[in-house]
Image: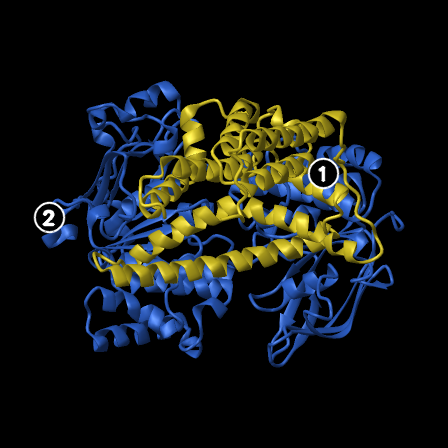
Amino acid sequence: MRVGAGPAAVDVVGFGFRYSGRPEWAVRDMDVRIEPGERILLTGASGSGKSTLLTAMAGLLGPDSGDARGAVRVDGRTAVQARDRIGILFQDPESQLVMSQAGDDVAFGLENRGVPAGEIWPRVRAALDAVGFGYPLDRSTHALSGGEKQRLVLAGAMVAEPGLLLLDEPTSQLDPDGAELVRAAVARILADRGTTLVLIDHEASPWLPLIDRVLEVQFGTTQAGVLELAPRWRPTVPVLPPRPSAQSRSNGTQGPLLPIGSTQGVLHSNGEDPLLRAAGAGYSYRADTAARPALALTDVELTAGQVTAITGPNGSGKSTLGLLLAGLKAPTVGRIVASPKLAGRLGDRPPHRWRARDLVHRIGTVFQNPEHQFLTGRVRDELSLGPLRAGAGDRAAHDRAEELLQRLGLHAYADANPFTLSGGQQRRLSVATSLATRPSVLVLDEPTFGQDPVTWAELVGLLAEARDAGTAVCLISHDARLVDGFADQELRLTSGVDHRQTAGFTGPGAAETPRSSDDQLGRNPTK
Amino acid sequence: MTTAGTVTGTPPAVWLGRINPVAQIVAILAITVTALATIDLLTPAVLVAAELALLPAAGLFQPRALLAKTWPLLLSAAGVAWVNLLFSASGGWDWTGSAALALRVIAVALPGVLFVASTDPVRVADALTVHWKVSTRFAYGALAAIRLAPLLVLEWQAIRLARRARGVDAGRNPIAAIRLFGGAAFALLVAAIRRGSRLALAMDARGFDATAGSTERTNARGSVLRSRDHLYVAGAVLLCATTTAASVATGLWHPVFSS
C-alpha cells in the first residue's frame, strides 16, 4: 500500500479557505513551495490562519468543511488525495488516542490503510522504537504521562512512513519534561529519515536547531500571504511588566532557604500577615487510601500584593492544592485558614464551606480550561455576573464590566458568545471574570498554558495590575519564564513522596505530624 | 484524579474474557430469551445459579467489588418484587410470583455485568467487525468514544467546581439546583462535542475515513472462533433447553403471553 517513499514536496498555490457558515476567509493568497526534506517553522500572530494552512496541508479540509480557492499539493497530488503520505500531530494527546493499549493505537493507522495483519506488528515495533517509546505493546494508554502519550501519537503517525510530517503545537499542552520528550522524539525521527517537516509551536526557540526555514503567515486587511523570515530569525521574548516598588519589596524579610515545614521557613514575605494559608493541608482520594495522597502535607502562605508560584511535576498535586486554596475542595487532612481580614463576618468557617457568593469576591479562581467557567451567552454578561452574584448593584456591575472590556480590548466582542472567542481571548476573559469581583486572593491554574507571546504579555500585565492593587496572586504553573520573572516566592511540590513519610496522614492528630520535607521553599527571584 | 481511569483499561486475564465476544453475545441472547419467555420461579432460579457460578470466571471474587457493580441491578430487582407484592391481582401476598419476577430481572441483567467485567471493549469491536461485519466506522468510533468517558468525568468535576468559583451555587433552592445542573450539563455537552470532533479529525488523519472508499480495513489483532467458543455457546443453549424442559415437565412453566 505504500505509495512512493522518501520526503514529499508541498506546493501551496494561491490558497484561500473559508469555513462553512463563516462570512470571512480564514486564510487567503497563500503561496509557498516546500522542497522535499525541508524543515519549516510556521509562525504568525493568533488568528493569522497558520493552523488552517497546516490542516489544509494535511488534506483534512475537504469540500464539506468550507470553500477553498487555489490548491495545496503534496508531491503533485492534491493534499486530500495524498493523505496516505501525510502524518499530523495535534495539541492534545487525549483527543488523538483511540485504543486502550499502546500497540493497538499505533496499529490503528495501518489497519485503516488496509496493511495485511502480518506486516503490522513489526512496523508498530519499529515506529515505537523510532520515537523512543520504552513500554511494552500492551501498556495502557491511560497510564502514560502527557509527553509519553504525545510520543505514542507521534509513533501512530510515523508508522505509516509519511513523506510529510505536520506538527500543530505538539507541546503546548505538556509540561516542560513532556515537551522535551516530544522534541527529542521528533529529532530522533528526523535523524533517521528525511521526512519533510512543517511545525507550528508558540515555544519556538527549542525547535530552532532542527529548522531550516522560518515562514510567517500573515493575514490582515492590507496584506495576506506567506513571508520568508531571515535565516537568523529568533522569536521575540515578551517583556515582563516592571515592578512598581522593587526596592521596598526586596528589603522585606524573606525567609531563609529552609524546608518550608520548619518554623523559620514559613513565609512572611513582606512582614504582613498572610491572607490565606494552608496549614499542613493534604488531600487523598477516599477510594484509594492505600495509594499515595494526591497532595502531601503542605504549608503555604498567600500575602497581599505578593505572587506565589506553585510548581512541580505532573502528579505532585499542584492543581489539588489550588482547589484547596480556592475554597473549592476540603482538605482531607490539615486546614486552609483565612485571615480575619479575608474572612470578615464569616469568622472561623473554612473557605470550602463559604457560600459561593461570599467566596467569589474573596477568592477568585481561574481554571485551566476557560470554557469550563463561562456561564452566560455574552462576554459583557460574563464580566458582570460575578459582581452581581457578590451583591453589587446593576449599575456597579455594568460599570465594572465596561471597564474590563476596555482594559482587555474586548469591546468589539462585548455581545459575542464567549465560546466563539479565540483561545487567547477566552483566556483573557476568564482572568478578567475572576478579577471583576476584585477578590483579595486570586488562584490561577496554568494561566499561560499554550498562549502566544502577545497574549502571554497581556495576561501577565493583568496579573501585575491585580498584584499592585494588593491582591495575593497564586500561580500554578510550569512556565519557567513566568515563575522566574514574576513570582515573589515559589513552592515546589515533589511527586514520588516516600510512602512511609506520609503513612500517618489519615490517622488521628495528623495535623501535628511533622510536615513533609519534600515541599521545599524555592528561591526568591526578586532578590 | 485516577479514580475514573479504568473504563477501558487492560482487563484482567480472566477465563471468561478469553471466550470470543460474539460467542458471549449469543449465549446472552439465549439466556435472555429463555428467562423472558416464562414467569415461573424455577427457570430464572436455575439461570441465576448458573450465572453466579460464572462470577469467579469473570474475575468477580470479592463481595464488595461485586456489590459495587450490581447494586443498581439488585435495587431494581427488589423494586420490581416490591411493586408486584403490593399490586398483585390475587389480593393475597404473592411471594412466589414476586420472587420469580425479581430473579427474572437478575437473570437477564447479570450476564451483561459478567460480559462488561470480563471483556475488553477492543476485542468486542474486533469480534463484531470480523465475524458479524458490523461497520468498522461504527465499532471503532464507539471504542474511541468509550475511551473519552473518564475524561468527561474529570471535565464534569471541573465544570461543577468552576460554577462555585464564579459565585453560582444553588444553596437550598431546588429549582436553582436543577437550573445549575442543566447549565453544567450543557457545558459538558459542548466540551464533549469539541473533544469528539477533535478526535474524529485525528482519526481521519490516520486514514480512518478511508474505509468508506476502496481500501478494506484490516485487523491487526484478528478475532478467532475456537472450539471453546462453540462449546460455550452449546453449553448455554443446553442449559436453557434443559431448564425449560424441566420447568415444563414439572408443570411450573408459565409462558409470558398466556394469562
Q: CA distance from mark 2 to mark 1?
A: 59 Å
A487 left or right, relative to A42: left
The kind of residue on which mark 1 rests is Arg
Which of B176 and A388 lies nearest the eye of the viewer?
A: B176
Residue picked out by circle 2? A347
Q: Which residue is mark 1?
A: A188
- In the depicted view, which residue is nearer to us: B88 or B124? B88
* Horizontal side of residue A262 vs B110, given as left or right: left
- Point out the residue furthest to the right here: A4
**Chain name for mark 1:** A
The tint of chain A in the picture is: blue
- For badge 2, the amino acid type reads Gly
Callout 2: residue from which chain? A
- Percent across and percent down for residue A93 are 59, 47
Q: Which chain is yellow?
A: B
Percent across and percent down for residue A252 are 22, 44
Q: Position of residue B153 (x, y in %)?
A: 45, 47
Q: Secondary structure at mark 1?
A: helix
Which residue occupies the foreground of this view, A96 or A76? A96
Q: Secondary structure at mark 2?
A: loop
**Rendered-image quadrant of the C terminus of chain A:** top left
Number of the front mark, 2 or 1? 2
Residue under the point 36% across and 53% down: B160
